Image (cartoon, rainbow, N blue to C red):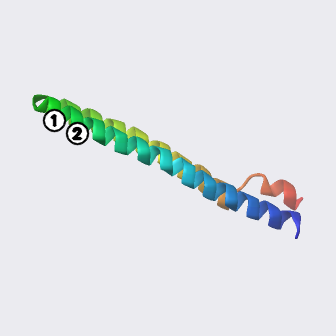
């Protein structure tokens, strides 16, 4: 097989691993954040508004990490800057 074929296969495998790992950890962090928020709500129901507000801000930050992983993986798959060096 040619160098370009190996490079394409390797970048696809690396992208799949990056998506798997890069989405697994934010998902675990979201589950832990929601669990801790529910625990805090059960202990102090009068602080519901501040807990929920802080939870949503934290979930948005965690979700942005997963989106950054997805963007980088899509760049590697569809517009890989290293592929130009192999073509030359």
- Name the residue carrying label 2: 38
**Hey, which quadrant is residue 51 in on the image?**
top left
**Which residue corresponds to the image point at 14% horizontal and 29% vertical from the top-left?**
44
| Residue positioned 86% across, 61% down in the render | 87
Q: Is residue 53 left or right of residue 59?
A: left
Q: Quadrant of the N terminus?
A: bottom right
Q: Quadrant of the C terminus?
A: bottom right
Mark 2 burial class by Cα count in 10 Å: few <14, some 14-19, many 20+: some
Residue annotated with mark 1: 42
Q: Nearer the viewer, residue 41 or 8?
A: 41
In the picture, measured across the screen, residue 55 lies left or right of residue 80, that is left
- Left of 54 or right of it: where is 20? right
- Which residue lies at the image location 61% right of the left edge and 51% below the top edge? 18
Q: In 3D space, how far apart are the residues under numbered discs 2 and 1 (Cα atoms)? A: 6 Å
Name the foreground residue: 58 vs 37.
37
Q: Position of residue 52 (x, y in %)?
A: 22, 37
Instruction: Characterize the local packing of mark 1: few (<14), some (14-19) or many (20 or more) Cα atoms within 10 angstroms.
Output: few
- Secondary structure, mark 1, is helix
């Amino acid at each position: 097989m040619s160098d370009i074929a190996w490079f394409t296969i390797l970048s696809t495998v690396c992208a799949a691993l990056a998506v798997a790992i890069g989405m697994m950890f934010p998902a675990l962090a979201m589950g832990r954040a929601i669990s801790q928020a529910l625990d805090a709500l059960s202990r102090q129901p009068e602080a519901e508004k501040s807990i929920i507000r802080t939870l949503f801000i934290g979930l948005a930050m965690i979700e942005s990490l997963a989106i950054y992983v997805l963007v980088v993986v899509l760049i590697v798959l569809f517009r890989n800057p290293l592929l130009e060096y192999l073509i030359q």
